Amino acid sequence: MTDVAGSLHSALVASHGGSNDVVVDSVGAENGTSDNTLSLLTMMTIGVAVIAFLVGGIGIMNVMLVSVAERIQEVGLRKAIGASNRQILDQFITEAYVLSGIGAVLGIALALATIGFLHLFTSLRPVIVWQAFLITPIVAVATGVIFGTFPAAKAARRDPIDALRQR
């Protein structure tokens, strides 16, 4: 495209009697700037998404730590009557799975509602990428399970006697 623009510019200068009073722009010349802007916006979006997942994961970990602390006597009682560390771990990991799964579903619903409001009240027409709606819940649940593993392991390792003594 650059070669064609150069040839066209030379032909126009020649037809104007050698006077360089014409400018020939090509779409490709502007494309570099928009590509850089798009790359920057993509990197910023990825950065915000990573921060959101870290904040969400830390939030799930905090909720799970509070849940473990409030239910420490339940854990002690279950272990005293024969529950294994694996069963206690599975209980709290399942809770983290459900908690993050509900958060993922609510997040997708909020995203769809926002897209609907944008359609109704503005001239913006967001593009819905269906792959994002498939990947997002998987990543959200994986984040919840990963960040919920620490509190679950903490609960599973508790000594039943110490857990029953706590109030």
Image (cartoon, grey):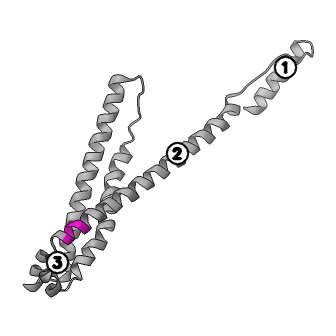
Query: Could you say whether the residue bearing mark 1 is in a helix, strand or loop?
Result: helix
Q: CA distance from mark 2 to mark 3?
A: 42 Å
Percent across and percent down for residue 2 are 75, 32
| Mark 2 or 1: the one toward you | 2
Crowd around label 2: few <14 · some 14–19 · many ≥20 (10 Å): few
Residue depicted at 21% across the width and 59% down the height: 98
Instruction: Note whether 29 is above or below 104 in the view shown.
Output: above
Give 140 or 32, whichever is nearer the viewer. 140
Q: Which residue is mark 2?
A: 42
- Of the residues shown, which amino acid type is indicated by label 3? Gln
Give 159 or 10, whichever is nearer the viewer. 159
| Mark 3 or 1: the one toward you | 3
Instruction: Note whether 103 is above or below 10 in the view shown.
Output: below
- Left or right of 25 in this view: 58: left
Residue depicted at 16% across the width and 83% down the height: 84
Q: Which residue is mark 3?
A: 87
- Left or right of 31 in this view: 160: left
Residue depicted at 25% across the width and 46% down the height: 106
- Of the residues shown, which amino acid type is indicated by label 2? Thr
- Residue 12 in the magenta stretch? The answer is no
Instruction: Note whether 152 is above or below 61 in the view shown.
Output: below
Q: Residue 11: which disc?
A: 1
Q: CA distance from mark 2 to mark 1?
A: 40 Å
Query: Could you say whether the residue bearing mark 2 is in a helix, strand or loop?
Result: helix
Quadrant for the C terminus in the image = bottom left
Percent across and percent down for residue 41 are 54, 42
Residue depicted at 30% across the width and 59% down the height: 141
Query: Could you say whether the residue bearing mark 3 is in a helix, strand or loop?
Result: helix
- Left or right of 33 in this view: 167: left
Percent across and percent down for residue 77 are 9, 80
